[in-house]
Amino acid sequence: MQTEPSADLEALAVSVSAQMTGFLLALAQVARGDEPEIALSHLMLETSQLGLAGGRLAALSDVGLDDQFEVDPGDDPDLDTLRDGLRRLLGELDVYVDVVDPMAPERGTAVFRVSDELTSVAADLMHGMAHFSQGRTAEALWWWQYSYLSSWGSALLSAQRAVSSLVAHTRLDADSVVAGPV
């Protein structure tokens, strides 16, 4: 049995859930590829909005749970269609290089894919959304905060930086080799 969250935490959960739902819907829409000319702009806006939700979660003191183990929210969603749609849409622009951990520069850089990072973010958000939709608000907040700090926060920011770079190149580089959806 979980202790009910305070009214403030309940309001935060509702607000964060709405931002996450908006991100997930927009990401699915972008991945469909119906509007490739504005795909990068939409990704820039949506990753920025979700970053705000993540920042709000990170600013909280740690959300605690009464039980030691997380309740299983059910099966993980199949996100292959989302990942494949983003890969198709972005093509060769999907791949980028980033620092593995800015606080541990000795770890160097690695190759990432915007599609993989955003799909990973979606999976983490959906896991928490399952708790939230099943009425386990404290568990949803705990999961969103924990997974923001451990995985989806850095994946989101890394993908957002890559998308921001793509937007800048498409808008500023008259002779750029970077071409693709804006």
Image: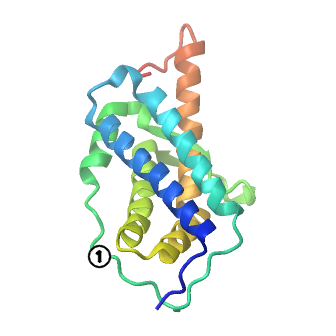
Residue 19 rendering spot, x and y as whole percentages: 49, 49
Give the colouring mode of the picture. rainbow
Q: Is residue 165 at all visible to an observer of this figure?
A: yes
Q: Which residue is drawn at 30% across and 68% down?
A: 76
Residues 3 and 36: in front is 3
Q: Quadrant of residue 130?
A: bottom left
Q: Which residue is drawn at 39% across and 52% down?
A: 119
Residues 71 and 180: in front is 71
Residue 44 rendering spot, x and y as whole percentages: 52, 33
Residues 16 and 70: in front is 16
- Looking at the image, residue 99 sits to the left or right of residue 11; the answer is right
Q: Residues within 10 Å of mark 1 (few under 14, many from 20)?
A: few
Q: Which amino acid, mark 1?
A: Gly
- Looking at the image, residue 177 sits to the left or right of residue 26; the answer is right
Q: Is residue 110 at all visible to an observer of this figure?
A: no
Query: Could you tell me which secondary element the residue under label 1 belongs to?
Result: loop
Q: Does 124 sit above or below residue 180?
A: below
Q: Does 97 sit above or below residue 155?
A: above
User: Which residue carries the number 1 mark?
Assistant: 74
Residue 61 rendering spot, x and y as whole percentages: 71, 71
Q: Does 17 sit above or below residue 22?
A: below
Residue 120 rendering spot, x and y as whole percentages: 42, 57
Q: Which residue is drawn at 37% across and 19% down?
A: 37
- Looking at the image, residue 116 sits to the left or right of residue 80; the answer is right
Q: Which residue is drawn at 44% across and 21% down?
A: 182
Residue extending furthest toward the front: 7
Q: How many labels does the image show?
A: 1
